[in-house]
Image: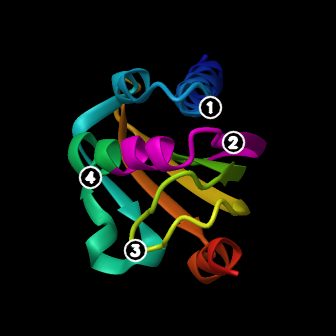
Amino acid sequence: MELLNVQSRKIEMKNACVHFMFSYQNKDVAQMMSFCDPEGEVFFSPLGEAGRGKIGELGKNLWTLLIDCFPNINNTIDAIVSEGDLVRCQVLISGTQAKDFAGIPNKGKTFNSDHIFIFHLNRTNKIDQIEIQWNHEDFVKQLSA
């Protein structure tokens, strides 16, 4: 019975993360936040300490800005794996820049970037930690070339 509970929990965790990514795909930040603990921590790893903050503040603001600056932003989940208390999603994110973004002038360029989202969920299946990794230098290069 315990094995069944563990497997059920892993499925629930994966589902919450898929719903979060689906909401991102639909550009619905409010819905994304509904799957999260707003006091939880987000860490946009390539940005160093400037990329660390609360999901309901830094995360919400950055995703809102991304959607505004890349109105056709798209994400495709390539893989989703549960690893203990974590869920790792390998995601391809792409979009065409329509506005200046984070010091990158708008040249109307498109980016394609592999991202890894590492989620931790609390006991009520709310996402309370997210770490996002990507090649930031390549992202900037694609938009600046």
Q: Mark 3 sits on what residue?
A: 103
Nearer the observer, 82 or 100: 100
Task: Identify which amino acid the numbered label 2 is placed on.
Answer: Asn
Callout 2–callout 1 Cβ contact below 8 Å: yes
Task: Identify the residue position indicated by label 4 in the image.
Answer: 58
Residue in front for this viewpoint, 36 or 125? 36
| Location of mark 1 (residue) | 25
Magenta-drawn stretch contains 70: yes
Q: Which residue is pictured at 60% across the width and 24% down the height?
A: 15
Q: Which mark is residue 48?
A: none
The 10 Å Cα crowd at callout 2, few under 14, some 14 to 19, many 20 or more, is many
Label 2 to label 3: alpha-carbon separation = 23 Å
Could you say where residue 24 lies in the image, as x and y percent from the top left?
Answer: 54, 33
Q: Is residue 91 visible?
A: no
Residue under numbered circle 2? 75
Q: Is residue 114 magenta?
A: no
For the record, the magenta segment spans 62-82
Disc nearer the start of the sequence (3/1): 1
Judge whether 69 appears above or below 111 on screen: above
Disc 2 secondary structure class: strand
**x and y percentages locating residue 143 in the rendered image:** 64, 71
Q: Amino acid at mark 4?
A: Leu
Left or right side of 14 for 44: left
Q: Residue at x 59, y 77 (%)?
A: 140
Q: Residue furthest front?
A: 107
Image quadrant occupied by the C terminus: bottom right
Sequence-wise, which precedes: disc 4 or disc 3? 4
Q: Quadrant of residue 55?
A: top left
Q: Residues within 10 Å of mark 3 (few under 14, many from 20)?
A: few
Q: Earlier in the sequence, mark 1 or mark 4?
A: 1
Work out how far the residue at label 4 is from the one at label 2, CA to CA, in angstroms.
20 Å
